[in-house]
């Protein structure tokens, strides 16, 4: 089998491979710092028991499922019973629950969401405290 | 190696048992997902409950435009209902129209003075047999146990089947982003309630009989603001104020002939002395 214009083709292939692997060269050896969501909102600092509705590890991995469960129980089953942690009651709500303590969406929610390149549509409807209210 | 029938049946039986039981066993051992019910929960809080919520609109209690506007504003302000100038984009939870449009087929040649010009308050009828719920392909709109026809905005895909099905025009589609601004730079939502979400472009919305207020033990915002013009209560409770009005007044419902059984009744005209 003969490769016509072999030189040009192989040269082209090398350039092509070089171009599509640019992202790898570009980031090679650079470790992107893992996100560090901030927990230092005034409300959290004022809490006697700094405890979320579940331990940190579970919240980190499962918060979206918890929110989903809450949504179903509140909207569909009208079960709005509050959750008690350390004697404080929390509403099963993103806007009127989570964000009351975690009022820093940019330094909390968005930190990991940006890192993981996920774009949850919570904010299309739910307000975040003091941020883009219009 | 040859196997006789007896050995074959033994192996087949054992394999079946393992196959059926094995998956259950494995699933059982796997780390279970979280359920909201696993969280420590506070005691039941005093919300309003009913077998079937309903409302009476007593038109004799609305003396002027101002009375009606106050009720509409009360609802639209707390639910972040946007105001669009273009009537084709209108979003409404509670609104008014003429007698002829509210009760088509009930108009006659000679009518009581002023009746035709009177603005009638309308809202979602929370029908016993809601056509919107039957057609919704995602169950985004559904009927709660207490009769309220509720919207789950997270599920709405904006197909607008419910709007086509609803004979009362109670549903509005968000043609534009309700969080946007009009040509003059005014936000569509005039007064924001930070406790309540907005909607997004491409979903259908409507009155929910203020489920979020009922859960707190409050009357719907419109009823609270109406000075007795809107009476909210349990249709299935013979002792309720609502049933008392229905017993003592002649009431009509919108488009009863369609068989959706609306839960909103109208007292028309000053028949206080009936």
Image (spheres, coloured by chain):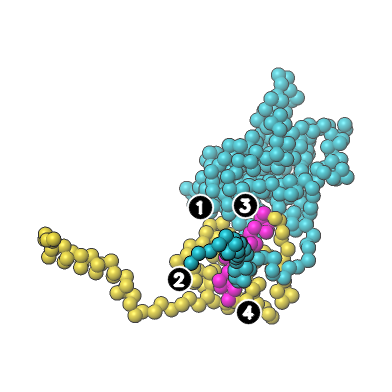
Mark in the foreground, 4 or 2? 2
In the figure, what tint was chain B given? Answer: cyan
Q: Residue at x 56, y 73 (%)?
A: A60
Quadrant position of residue B274:
top right
Label 3: which residue?
A: B152
Per the rendering, the mark at residue A115 is 2
Of the two numbered discs 4 and 2 on the same chain, state the one appearing first in sequence.
4
Mark in the foreground, 4 or 1? 4
Mark in the foreground, 4 or 3? 3
Measured from the top left, where is residue A78 in percent x and y? 71, 56
Callout 2: SS: helix
Q: Nearer the viewer, residue B47 or B94?
A: B47
Quadrant position of residue B266:
top right
Per the rendering, the mark at residue A45 is 4
Measured from the top left, where is residue B142 in percent x and y? 66, 47
Subunit that carries the residue with mark 2: A
Q: Which contiguous range is marked in magenta?
A: A57-76
Q: Are the residues tagged 1 and 3 within 8 Å (C-beta)?
A: no
Estimate how packed mark 1 is, as few (under 14), some (14 to 19) or many (20 or more) residues with alpha carbons within 10 Å: some
Per the rendering, the mark at residue B20 is none
Q: Residue at x 55, y 62 (%)?
A: B4
Label 1: which residue?
A: B180
Q: Nearer the viewer, residue B268 or A22?
A: A22
Tell me, by letter, which chain the rendering colours yellow: A
Q: Residue at x 32, y 72 (%)?
A: A24
- Labels 3 and 2 in the same subunit: no
């Amino acid at each position: 089998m003969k490769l016509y214009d072999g030189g040009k083709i192989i040269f082209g292939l090398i350039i092509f491979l070089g171009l599509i692997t640019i992202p790898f060269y570009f980031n090679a050896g650079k470790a992107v710092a893992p996100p560090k969501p901030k927990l230092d909102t005034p409300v959290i600092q004022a809490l006697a028991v700094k405890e979320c509705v579940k331990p940190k590890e579970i919240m980190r991995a499962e918060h979206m499922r918890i929110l989903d469960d809450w949504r179903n129980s509140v909207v569909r089953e009208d079960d709005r019973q509050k959750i008690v942690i350390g004697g404080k009651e929390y509403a099963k709500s993103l806007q009127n629950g989570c964000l009351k303590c975690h009022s820093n969406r940019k330094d909390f929610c968005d930190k990991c969401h940006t890192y993981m390149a996920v774009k949850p549509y919570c904010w299309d409807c739910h307000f975040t405290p003091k941020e883009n209210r219009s | 190696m040859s196997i006789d029938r007896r050995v074959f049946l033994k192996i087949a039986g054992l394999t079946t048992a393992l196959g059926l039981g094995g998956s259950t066993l494995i699933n059982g051992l796997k780390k279970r997902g979280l359920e909201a019910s696993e969280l420590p929960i506070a005691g039941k809080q005093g919300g309003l409950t009913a077998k079937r919520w309903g409302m009476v609109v007593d038109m004799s209690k609305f003396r002027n435009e101002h009375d009606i506007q106050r009720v509409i504003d009360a609802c639209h302000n707390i639910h972040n209902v946007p105001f669009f100038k273009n009537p084709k984009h209108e979003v409404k939870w509670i609104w008014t129209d003429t007698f002829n449009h509210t009760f088509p087929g009930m108009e006659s040649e000679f009518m009581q003075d002023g009746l035709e010009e009177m603005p009638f308050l309308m809202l979602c009828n929370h029908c016993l047999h809601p056509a919107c719920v039957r057609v919704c392909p995602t169950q985004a709109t559904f009927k709660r146990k207490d009769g309220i026809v509720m919207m789950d905005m997270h599920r709405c895909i904006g197909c607008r089947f419910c709007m086509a099905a609803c004979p009362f025009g109670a549903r509005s589609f968000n043609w534009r982003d309700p969080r946007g601004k009009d040509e003059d730079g005014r936000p569509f939502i005039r007064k924001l309630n930070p406790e309540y979400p907005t909607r997004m472009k491409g979903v259908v919305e409507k009155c929910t009989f203020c489920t979020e207020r009922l859960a707190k033990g409050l009357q719907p915002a419109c009823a609270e603001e109406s000075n007795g013009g809107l009476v909210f209560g349990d249709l299935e409770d013979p002792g309720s104020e609502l049933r008392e009005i229905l017993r003592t007044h002649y009431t009509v419902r919108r488009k009863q002939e369609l068989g959706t059984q609306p839960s909103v009744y109208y007292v028309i005209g000053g028949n206080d002395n009936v």
